[in-house]
Structure formats: C-alpha cells, structure tokens
Image (cartoon, rainbow, N blue to C red):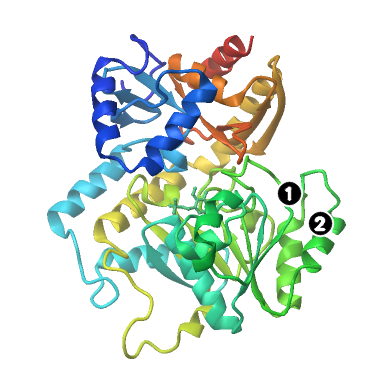
Amino acid sequence: MLGDQPPLVRSPLPGPAGQVLLDQLAQVESPAFTARRARRQERSGAAQDPIVWTEARGANVIDADGNRYVDLTSGFGVASVGHAHPRVVGAICAQAARLLHALGDLHPSTLKIELLSRLCALAPIADARAVLSLSGSDAVETALKTATLATGKPGVLAFEGAYHGLSHGPLAACGYAESFRAPFAAQLNPHVVFAPWPAHDASLRAALADVAGRLDADVGAILVEPIQGRGGVRMPPAGFLAGLADLAHEHGGLLIVDEIFTGFGRCGAMFLSAEAGVEPDLLCLGKSLGGGLPVSACVGRAEVMAAWGDPVGEAIHTGTFFGHPLGCAAALATLDVIEDEALAARTLELGEGWSRGLAALDGVRVVRGRGLMLGLELEADVLVVVRKLLERGYLTLPAGAGADVLQLVPPLNISRALLDGFVETLGEVLT
Ligand SMILES: Cc1ncc(COP(=O)(O)O)c(C=O)c1O
C-alpha cells in the first residue's frame, strides 16, 4: 500500500511530465524561488533539482511522472504522522462538510476552543493561555509582541544560526544567514543582539557567560530553539536551555522557546523544553501540529499573556484565518495520533538505532541530533549527495547556511525497513 513502499524511480529526473510543469513554473513563479534552484543546480551538477509532487501518503511521495519516493524531509518537518494520515484526512473531510470558516477571535468555533484547551493542557506551562495562528512565523511574531508588551522592552537576544521564520518580526532575529536580513535591514527591529550558538561539547559555563555579556538593558526576551533545525541540527550543551531561562529571568526578561520544529515528538519527547525541566514563558509551536494544514500557536504563562490587556475594544493581534476550523480539526486529529501511537517514545528508540547505522557508514563524519531529527556531516558535498539520493528515490534536504549538513527528518511512524533501506542506499551513494 502506498505509504510504506520502497522507492521506485523509473526515469531520469525530472521525467517528461515534470519537465513540462517546471518550464511552466519558471514562467510564472517569482525569481526569488527559481534563482535559488538554479544556484543549487550548479553545485549539484544536475540539470534540474526539483520534482513535481502530485500525491503523498505516509512516508511516500509520488511525482508527476509516477515515480515513488521515500520522504525523509516530512515536507519541512510537517508530516510527523505521515502524509495524509487517514485520521487527519477523515477529520478534515468531516469538518469541511460541517463548518469551513467561523469568525475567529470574535465568534469562535467549538474546535478552536477544543484545540486551545488541548494545547494549554499539553504545553509544559502551569497556567497557560494560547493564541492560534497559521505559520511558524506567526507564532514567533505573537511571542515577540507579547514579550514586548509584558516587559516593556523592545530588544531580543537570539542566536547565530537560528531560524525562526521570515516575516519581519522573526526575520530580525533570524541568525541563520546575514543575507536573509540584509535587504530588509532598514525595516527590521534594531534592538536584536546575536550570541554565538555553542557546540554540544562546549563549556556550558562559557556559553552562558557569553550570552550574559550580551544582555543589554533593551533586551526583554531570549529567543531560542532547543536544537537548531534548519541551522544544521546543532545541539547546545546539556543544561543550556535551563541556564538561558535563569539568565532571562535574572535580567527581568522572558524565555521564548521555539519548538516549531522540535516539538510534538520529533526529537523523542513531546517537547524538549519539558524534558529539560524548563517552563518557557512563551512557547512557539507549528509545523507538524496541523498534520499538513497550516496551524501554529504561541502558548504562554497566563500572567505574561495578560500583558495584552482586557479583551475590550478592538483585538490588536488577530488574523482572518487564525483558529480556522479545518486547521483545528486537523490539529486535534494529529495530536490524537501522536498520543495514541506513542510516537515520541517510538521516535526516540527508532532514532537511536538509525543514527548508529548511519554513523557506521564510510564517508559519514558526524551524526548529530535526537529522535528523528538528524544532521549528518559528510566527506562528500552534501548537495551532490542530496541529488544522488533523489535519483535513487529518497527526498532529503541540506541544512546549515552553507548547505553542509544532510538533514534527515522522516515521518515519526515510518517503518524500520524504510529507514534500513536508506542506510544501505546512502552507503552506496557515499562510496
Ligand atoms: C524552528 C523554526 N521556527 C520557525 C519556523 C518558521 O515557520 P514557517 O516557515 O511556518 O513560518 C521554522 C521553519 O522552518 C522553524 O524551523
């Protein structure tokens, strides 16, 4: 059955149908996207980088030419329960027939109330309140605005290599690459300071001292991913998150934890902040939450969220589609799947075995990460490897600003057999 099948690539990529579609795309898509692909082609040596997706189920993706792939990207970390999980699709279809849209923050749907209750109960925050939105950037934007209101300070300490989304608020704190911020620098929050992201084996004391030294009077929040995902699956030293919470609070500020990528079992725990014994002041969630639909949330301590004031007058932070009934239905079904199938525990166990297998391959220098968020440093050029894997039917992505890390983030319910098959293929590609 589609969902748990090995790769099957019949034609050179992209196939003839894909090529026609890509030519059409080049005529209509903003060069912001096509130019990036062209640069990738230069390095990967391939005539065309992308394939055109037409169908996806479980861990499988089908392209316009009928080729079948195993998705080790989960579509940017979204398909943690697999693509088109039947319980998620069922919930979406049932909801679509009942109520497609409500009046967001004015007249909510029952599902919005249910999802907010579920998230507040699930988040590692004692007395939680939440705001729903659509993208990860939205959730970070909400957190940044909340922190400003709660502390009266406009500044943020973020980390080099961090990725929090690209709308203006998060972009100012996006340490991933200077080139992302530079064209818009004049429009971005000027009160952001960046600290270096410490290596896993760095001294915790030195790393925290480095952060402390940069906390100027303007800084009201520290914004951090427990593991930098897009930045190259980079883990800080143990105890770093807890240390940051202490530093933020001693400084009269807040800790914003961005678990948009790491959350909901991806790293073998529901939330890495909870596992580290850290109660975030604000927690950003997204990606896999909607099971494939765009749903995100910012969950915060009630007293921090109270900074938005009494709900009288106009809502000063809202969006037409925030708390959309379809997204809420999909998110509730996704949370059911993650809990009922105990995916966080499965992920931890599966990830340990898989990373051992990958680390044993010739040509693999380092395997980093936790659960099913792994980053590999290779002896070969990562973009060349990504291309060769695509030709053999495995979807992977490069991570890190230099595209020097092979990022592996498969669905959390992928079969062991598919993961083993990938180890074998990667071994062939690397030799
Ligand atoms: C940790 C983290 N935060 C925020 C975002 C931004 O999410 P979105 O692309 O949905 O705006 C991402 C996206 O990759 C992410 O990995």
The residue lying at 69 percent from left, 56 percent from top is 276
Q: Is residue 192 visible?
A: yes
Mark 2 sits on what residue?
207
The residue lying at 45 percent from left, 20 percent from top is 390
- Please, what is the three-letter code of the amino acid marked with disc 1? Pro
The residue lying at 45 percent from left, 45 percent from top is 338
Return the residue found at the far left. Answer: 97
- Give the image quarter of residue 363: top right
Is label 1 in a helix, a strand or a loop? Answer: loop
Is label 2 in a helix, a strand or a loop? Answer: helix
Q: How many marks?
A: 2
Q: CA distance from mark 2 to mark 1?
A: 9 Å
Residue 183, given in percent of the width and then of the height, sits at 51, 56
Please state if 241 lies on the left or on the right of 28 as rendered.
right
188 or 128: which is nearer to us? 188
100 or 23: which is nearer to us? 23
Query: Is 89 above or below relative to 384?
Result: below
Q: Is residue 176 visible?
A: no
Residue 265, given in percent of the width and then of the height, sits at 53, 46
Mark 2 close to ligand 1, CB under 8 Å: no
Query: Is 226 above or below relative to 364?
Result: below
- Disc 2 + disc 1, Cβ < 8 Å: yes
Residue 236: numbered disc:
1
Mark 1 crowd level (few <14, some 14–19, many ≥20, 10 Å Cα):
many
Please state if 305 lies on the left or on the right of 66 as rendered.
right
